[in-house]
């Protein structure tokens, strides 16, 4: 089992993934808000869309942390590359 080193070329794909994810979460939140506004307060559909909005909000709050983890993995990969190359 080998370790795959994340290359700098992979960053563009990773960045696009974050952009698409943010767009999907934003559009999903907009749709859920629109649906919830047309429902009876405290009805099943209203509560379900509220839970969906809470979930999207929670997931969205993790995006910066995920970005830090990905960038850290790239930095560690670059350091590892130079370390093994200079040995």
Image (cartoon, rainbow, N blue to C red):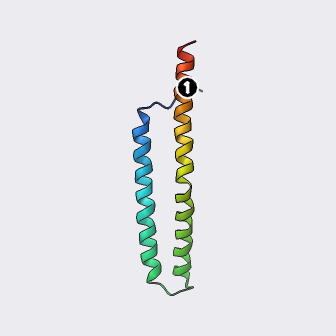
In the rendered view, would you say 24 is above or below 32? above
Residue 66 coordinates in the image, percent (x, y): 55, 47
Q: Residue at x 52, y 27 (%)?
A: 78
Residue 65 coordinates in the image, percent (x, y): 57, 49
The residue most toward the top is: 87
- Circle count: 1
Q: Along the line of sight, which residue is nearer the eye, 41 or 11?
A: 11
Residue 4 in view (yes/no): no
Residue 5 coordinates in the image, percent (x, y): 52, 29
Q: Quadrant of the N terminus?
A: top right
Asked whether, in this view, residue 45 is left or right of residue 11, the answer is: right
In the rendered view, would you say 31 is above or below 76? below
Asked whether, in this view, residue 20 is left or right of residue 69, the answer is: left
Q: Quadrant of the C terminus?
A: top right
In the rendered view, would you say 29 is above or below 68? below
Residue 46 in view (yes/no): yes
Q: Residue at x 39, y 46 (%)?
A: 16
Q: Which residue is mark 1?
A: 79
Q: Residue at x 55, y 82 (%)?
A: 44
Q: Secondary structure at mark 1?
A: helix
Picture quadrant of residue 79: top right
Residue 86 coordinates in the image, percent (x, y): 54, 13
The residue most toward the right is: 1
Q: Along the line of sight, which residue is nearer the eye, 40 or 71?
A: 71
């Amino acid at each position: 089992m080998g370790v795959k080193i994340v290359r700098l070329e992979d960053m563009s794909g990773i960045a696009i993934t974050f952009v698409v994810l943010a767009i999907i979460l934003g559009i999903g939140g907009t749709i859920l808000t629109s649906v919830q506004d047309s429902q009876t307060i405290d009805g099943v559909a209203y509560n379900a869309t509220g839970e969906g909005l809470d979930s999207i909000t929670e997931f969205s709050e993790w995006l910066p942390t995920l970005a830090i983890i990905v960038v850290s993995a790239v930095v560690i990969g670059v350091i590892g590359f130079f370390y093994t190359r200079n040995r």
